[in-house]
Amino acid sequence: MALSYPVFFALYSVSMVVGVFVALLIFIGWKDMYWRTALRSLRYNAVYVILIAAFPLLVQGQDILERQLADEGSNTVVYTNWIFDLAGDTIGVLQDRFNYAVVIDFFIIIYAWVFAFITYLVPVFLLVKDDRATLRVYAIAMMFNYIVLTPFYLVFPVSVTGSHPDAGVTPFLYASRSWGQMVTSVDPLDNDFPSGHVSLSVTPFLLFAYAGVQYRRMSYFLGGATIAIAFSVLYLGVHWPADVFAGFILAVAATVAARNERIQMRIDRYVRIISRKLFREKPEGAPSSQQVQH
């Protein structure tokens, strides 16, 4: 019996929470998870965490702006045709080679569950590890990703491959009843270039790969997940090859920029100011009220 959408979404949400907790047990271990330390880390990195959580809202706000543009529809058709000219029917050929129900279901889960899982797992993982330096780099890299993605989605709308009449692509993702409904409820279906799924999954992989041997297992997992996500966005009738390539380039550029110490320190200076105001903390070295009275 098919599940109703509210039940499906509830199970999806519960599975996400359980999945993150299980991943923490696997990659960190129960004995090494100190929740008080994680809470202190959360307080210290509160502004970065808020930024990470707020970034996706930029895309949703951009979608509202898109709908107010008078020539949105014509621009979408024009730009989609440009991207189509670069790829032709490549994706249709790919789908014909792997047109199996079990393969379709597997990559739908990769696209709609594993990608979201990574976006939740990475900041939680870094908070529990109390790795403030890596969390700072991750937040800045994600900020750079969205700074580029948002204007591209606004002024250069490109439709999903499954909606192009000449691409010969079957919209596997959107034909799925529950998964398709969940995706289309938040996706305007013309935020294709560059691929946010690719850039936002390649970015944490690169950061953990650069972080050293202590995160080797995490980087292996993220590397495998990133490859699967890149394939899924093509196979399911969502992205064009040009979108995937551009998403990869964006991730590399965002990672390089975020790892620049001068950029980090400049951004972190403003973050610390906001954090002190948020928690009403005094700057380091400032006298306390008792010291002033004495």
Image (cartoon, rainbow, N blue to C red):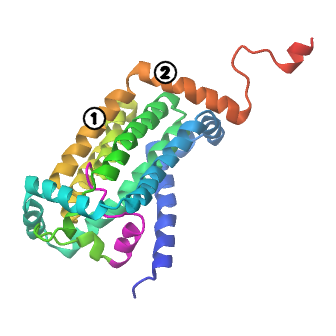
Q: Amino acid at mark 1?
A: Val
122 sits left or right of 96 in the view:
right
- Relative to 86, residue 281 above or below: above
Q: What residue is at 51 percent from the left and 32 percent from the top?
A: 131
Q: Is residue 79 magenta?
A: no
Disc number for residue 265: 2
- The image's mark for residue 36 is none
Q: Position of residue 128 (x, y in %)?
A: 55, 40
The residue that label 1 is drawn on is 252
Amino acid carrying mark 2 in the image = Met
Above-or-below relation of 271 to 77:
above
Secondary element at image label 2:
helix
Q: Is residue 185 visible?
A: yes
The secondary structure type at the circle numbered 1 is: helix
Q: Quadrant of residue 70?
A: bottom left
Q: Earlier in the sequence, mark 2 or mark 1?
A: 1
- Category of crowding for the residue at label 2, using alpha-carbon neighbours closer than 10 angstroms: few (below 14), some (14–19), many (at least 20): few
Instruction: Tell me the quarter of the image containing the C terminus.
Output: top right
Q: In this image, 197 relative to 269: left or right?
A: left
- Magenta range is 177-194
Residue 2 x %, y %: 39, 85
